[in-house]
Image: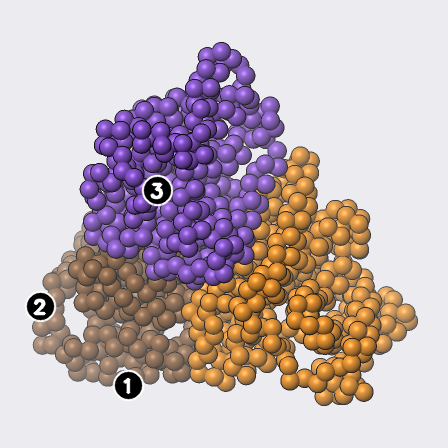
Chain colours: A brown, B purple, C orange
């Protein structure tokens, strides 16, 4: 009942009807790549929203620490599931593009649109600059960390270099996951007060019973996994039909689709003049991609992928990630925002997206 | 009378006598490239000062909004006129160097010298860090925006890449001009209070009659255009005679000559302990080059130039522009300045200029 | 007596016994490269600590200005002596790696560990953000300055480019040393109040007689020079035996050994909740490497080296130096620290070290 009521009250969730549609379409017309691509993209959006709601519900019921842990770990579950489907299919260009794209989309598009939407309603918005700076600092360091193999490794060098990049990527993945664990200890145990605003998100919602929450979490995870599978199978053909490069699909479409649920939350908080929450969601989610999702994918590629995946990104992606994390640091530095700042940050994102859209496809 | 009084009171304007000299010299000795080059550079400086004064006078008479618009749009008119002359002559290396050089000269040399000159008179100077951060953030984002084609495009790739870079540059130019328009809306209409210090510049001056102001504006614009023409015709020969590379001429000489009038204003404000105004002029002018002058030149190249111009800069220019905008963000961040900070920022500019001076000329 | 008492009270100084050991070992077994390498590294650590103590003692006795000058100039004497030994041996890769490594180790490892060690004892540590920002700004500008030849010069270009890089490096060295001199004027004469915390370091210590302090300073300098000689002679053979690349040895081992004494001081200040002092030592020492040690080495290479040394670094070193100075700016910006921030900064350093450790040795 509660679940149905939630669905009825949230127009976004009406898109859930597309989930059976895409599964049926896949069975009946497995070759209609473009149709399957569009349907699966549209079906993932409400699933991601539901996934994030179920995670929150489970988190509320399990006490502060475990709940925080769940929220933090499952916050980017959709991105992770899509990337896993691409990983299993060996589409490493898509996986890497979606990692880079998620960091850039979170720290430019989500942050910029939150500033813009909030600024259109409120003349000037102030937020806690100390926690914003701390989170921007974490994001910058996390971005630097995952970029080390790209900057130091040389793509054109021979086998020695490839082996070096792989060893470095794997070692780095372990270091990043340990760092992520300590970061959770910091955020949930020793210094929770810095992240307080972000933690007490949407407490006004009705609570679901534990069984419902867990069942939804499990069920929706399976559905996201299934739809992601269809998405990844159809994306390459569909992209070439629609004239899109795999870089654009991974960097822009997967990233925005995967982060749709967080975006809704961040934008709604900005409209309510709670920019602390928006900044926390945007920067926190971007940091999590770098410190958790990316290294988990590297390690899982040893088990699930056709060959180990490294963390070497193409130069444009490196530049965009660096710019995104520096921009996030510079614009949150003042602790104050107005609509044009949000517009400008969003424009930088749109310029990146435009560039990838225009980029001639290449053999990679 | 007022105009003559202004000229008499301002030693810089005595150089106006060089304007007829250069025009006569061009008619009599069209081959004396080095002489014409030196004379035209010296003649542009007082014209730029007069142009900026006439613009202010027209702006004062036309009310806050239109006046602000005029001030903002014509603030870099000299740079635009010089670049246009170079554009018509198809000297795109010079055009691009003058764009990059103007951004770097404004955000390093003008800012640094203002800090240094102010700091030699005042022990410590405080300025409004919030509006400085906002302007530094705008400048950083504007710089990133015009650098996207350089970072993503590959100079050595074939025709597909050249077409991509051109399409991207043209699309980007449109996006930047729209952004610039919204920025004016922000600065003049919705959030004028952030830019208040910069707007109320030199209100102590005597007012000119409207007819005088408009006539001066029109007449001086034509003279700047004529002298720029001579400058551009003579620069290549003169530079090779003087052993200067086109990059050095565009990046250093054109940029400093074009910004001479704003520099006088920024330095004088710094000496009067009004660093808010200096920072506003320096960073505002740099942002305007990126968001307005550069895209206007790209679009006009379709009409006026021998072939469309793109926004691809050479790697050294990219590095210098990024460093300049990051430096501006870092040094204005504290909202406090002292002489050595200004010295250091100026030294970074001088090192850039020295590098371009020493750089062996290359076939480009 | 005082000297012996100091040695007895400081366990680190017990390692001084290794100084005669390494000198004897060199005479008896000149071919035991690995042994000599390990012994000389271990012997330099207590010598550096003693050198820094003697410098402080002389400085205390010679009044504020000369004392400050001495402290500032001799603060990185150990790094300078090691680099000089490498310079005379013509090992420019090692010299450059130790310059880059010292900047990175000071601004990432020393700062990060100070934040971490301080944060493990104190929940949140506040420090003066204004002087931290000023010092981070100086460090950023100093880093940019020494990186100009690397960014503009092209390693693969021909003789014209090599000559250009050399001329630029030498001119730059002169500019940097003049800048350093003016920086001392700023820090010691005109604006000492910004650096007050760092100046009044360890005043609780007993004072040595002037003769003892000067004699120790002279004697230890000679010993460091002798041991550095042995270190440089043995390092290449030992590194290849131990499987370490010269880049790793210079960048990590030399940098940390050379800075050991300052690290002890910075960490101890952090534990005492005097982060201002830690930040001052870490960033000040990094700036000094860029503005003083590096240009002095370039100029001395004309006299002492087999051929002039330039300031062109390999791309990975450029990236690491830029990241280090940007990170220092970002993390000191908030004026507040907690353990995880220190951990994260340290992790970035460790990732850099790990990368250099894994890097396959190349012909350079």
- Out of A27 and B343, give the one closest to the viewer: B343
Q: Picture coordinates of residue B26 (x, y %)?
A: 47, 15
Residue A173 is at least partly visible in this image: no
Query: Which quadrant would residue A2 be assigned to in this image?
Result: bottom left
Asked whether residue C135 is in view, the answer is yes
Q: Nearer the viewer, residue A85 or A278?
A: A278
Numbered badge on residue B288: 3
Pointers 3 and 2 in contact (C-beta within 8 Å): no
Q: Residue furthest right?
A: C28
Dot 2 and dot 1 residues touching (CB under 8 Å): no
Between discs 2 and 1, the one toward the N terminus? 2
The x, y position of residue A302, in whole percent, is 46, 64
Left or right: B71 as drawn, with respect to B345: left
Instruction: Using the image, tell me which numbered label, if any, was put on residue A63.
Output: 1
How dense is the environment of label 3, judged by Cα within 10 Å: few (below 14), some, or many (20 and up)? Answer: many
Where on the picture, by quarter, is residue B44?
A: top left
Q: Is residue B221 above or below residue B133?
A: above
**Measured along the vertical axis of the image, is residue B160 above or below residue C79?**
above
User: Picture quarter containing residue B73?
Assistant: top left
Secondary structure beneath label 1: loop
Q: CA distance from mark 3 to mark 2?
A: 49 Å
Residue holding disc 2: A8
Front residue of A157/C94: it is C94
- Give SS at disc 2: helix
Total numbered badges shown on the rendered structure: 3
Which element type, helix, strand or loop, lies under badge 3?
Answer: helix
Comparing marks 2 and 1, which lies closer to the viewer? 1
Q: Is residue A45 above or below residue B167?
A: below
């Amino acid at each position: 009942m509660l679940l149905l009521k939630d669905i009825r009250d949230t127009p976004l969730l009406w898109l859930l009807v597309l989930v059976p549609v895409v599964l049926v379409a896949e069975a009946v017309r497995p070759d209609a790549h473009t149709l399957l691509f569009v349907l699966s993209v549209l079906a993932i959006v409400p699933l991601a929203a539901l996934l994030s709601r179920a995670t929150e519900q489970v988190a509320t019921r399990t006490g502060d620490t475990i709940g925080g842990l769940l929220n933090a770990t499952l916050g980017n579950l959709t991105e992770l599931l899509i990337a896993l489907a691409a990983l299993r299919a060996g589409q490493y260009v898509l996986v890497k593009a979606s990692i880079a794209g998620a960091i850039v989309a979170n720290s430019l598009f989500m942050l910029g649109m939150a500033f813009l939407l909030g600024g259109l309603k409120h003349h000037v918005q102030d937020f806690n600059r100390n926690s914003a700076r701390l989170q921007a600092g974490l994001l910058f360091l996390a971005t630097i960390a995952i970029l080390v193999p790209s900057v130091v490794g040389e793509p054109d060098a021979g086998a020695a270099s490839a082996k070096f990049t792989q060893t470095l990527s794997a070692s780095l993945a372990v270091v990043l996951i340990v760092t992520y664990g300590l970061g959770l200890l910091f955020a949930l145990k020793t210094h929770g007060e810095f992240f307080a605003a972000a933690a007490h998100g949407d407490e006004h919602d009705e609570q679901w019973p534990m069984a419902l929450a867990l069942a939804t979490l499990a069920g929706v995870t399976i559905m996201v996994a299934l739809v992601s599978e269809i998405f990844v199978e159809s994306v390459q053909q569909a992209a070439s039909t629609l004239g899109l490069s795999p870089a654009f699909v991974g960097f822009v479409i997967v990233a925005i689709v995967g982060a749709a649920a967080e975006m809704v939350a961040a934008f709604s908080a900005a409209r309510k003049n709670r920019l602390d929450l928006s900044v926390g969601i945007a920067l926190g989610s971007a940091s999590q991609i770098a410190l958790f999702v990316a290294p988990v994918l590297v390690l899982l590629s040893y088990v699930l992928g056709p060959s180990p995946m490294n963390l070497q990104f193409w130069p444009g992606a490196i530049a965009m990630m660096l710019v995104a994390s520096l921009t996030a640091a510079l614009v949150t530095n003042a602790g104050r925002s107005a609509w044009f700042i949000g517009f400008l940050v969003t424009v930088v994102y749109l310029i990146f997206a435009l560039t990838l859209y225009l980029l001639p496809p290449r053999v990679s």
